[in-house]
Amino acid sequence: MESLKTMKDLGYAFNSAGQLRKVDSDGLPTDEPFQFSVSDQHQECQAHYEKLGDAITNYIYHLLETQENLMRLPVPVGSSQGTFIFVTKDYDKKDVLMILINGSGAVRAGQWARSLIINDCLDMGTQIPYIKKAHAKGFGVMVLNTNDNCLPNGKKIPQSSTAEEHASYVWDNYIVKAKAESVVIVAHSYGGVVTLALADRLKNKFDERVKAIAFTDSVHSFSNIKMSEHFKEVSRNWISSSAPIDTPMNTPDFDCSRVSAGHPKHEMTSYACMDSVFKFIEEKLTKV
């Protein structure tokens, strides 16, 4: 198996503003942004993009551990042959625990959107701004890794073969043991499906502990799982829209309230509505 290349191997680095740039002969970032076309063969260009995406994933893991002081917890517990989640070191002792759940696809723990990381900047595409704000508020933080479902040999990871199974296992083995009486969830896109499936399985156990759910352009309505009244009460979905942030949007009776994320691009919703999300969470926690 080909060894994983680093960003520098592929000719890239992040500059001080968190923007991905080509590097010069000394390995320092230039002003030249990412370029998809590295040859006239689309397959070759796509392969280069995928390798860069893998290198970025490892770099973000590195940032979570070194810059944000998070640590890895194994999934399954005690296994070195599975996946992992990230947590703040005292996550299990805090009164409030924030859980971050990304969407489906290539993104891994710590990422909202790979395209934004590559073409815009780290702040827009990663969960790091959320982690910083949560930490500043004294919350414990847990970052799920719902899309890491396969071992290098292609076999499914036990207890993490799907996003839903991953979240369910993490709840049963880590969240249950945490002190926090108030759990808050921020979930993007397919992360909403994962959250609703978790609530449906846990029923009252979920309702007792989860005090706020912030969706960013969630697609949970496609899951065909009926939303409980408690779930509706503690949830809000910031959907992609060019309307001003927090503008009320048309909401069906079966769903939680929908408001504008203040941005028409799906991938940008998590970053665009972050301040409103934290304000909403604080309001829900105040009611507890």
Image: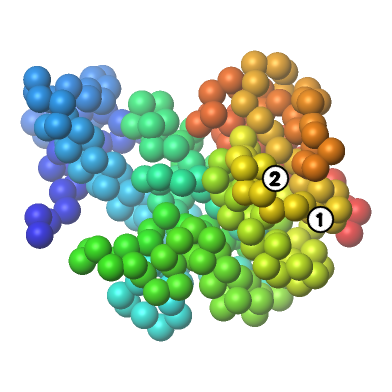
Q: Is residue 130 left or right of residue 213?
A: left
Note whether 172 is above or below 59 in the view shown.
Answer: below
Could you tell me if residue 63 is visible in this image? no
Residue 166 position, x and y percent, is: 50, 65
The residue drawn where x is 41% and y is 83% is: 78
Note whether 189 is above or below 41 in the view shown.
Answer: below
Quadrant of the snapshot with the C terminus: bottom right
237 or 288: nearer the viewer: 237
Q: Which residue is mark 2?
A: 214
Residue 203 picture quarter: bottom right
Instruction: Name which residue type carries label 1.
Output: Ser
44 or 134: nearer the viewer: 44
Residue 224 position, x and y percent, is: 66, 49
**How dense is the environment of label 1, judged by Cα within 10 Å: few (below 14), some, or many (20 and up)?**
some
Q: Is residue 11 left or right of residue 213?
A: left
**How dense is the environment of label 2, judged by Cα within 10 Å: few (below 14), some, or many (20 and up)?**
many
Q: Earlier in the sequence, mark 1 or mark 2?
A: 2
Q: Mark on residue 202?
A: none
Instruction: Name which residue type carries label 2.
Output: Ala
Q: Which residue is mark 1?
A: 228
43 or 70: nearer the viewer: 43
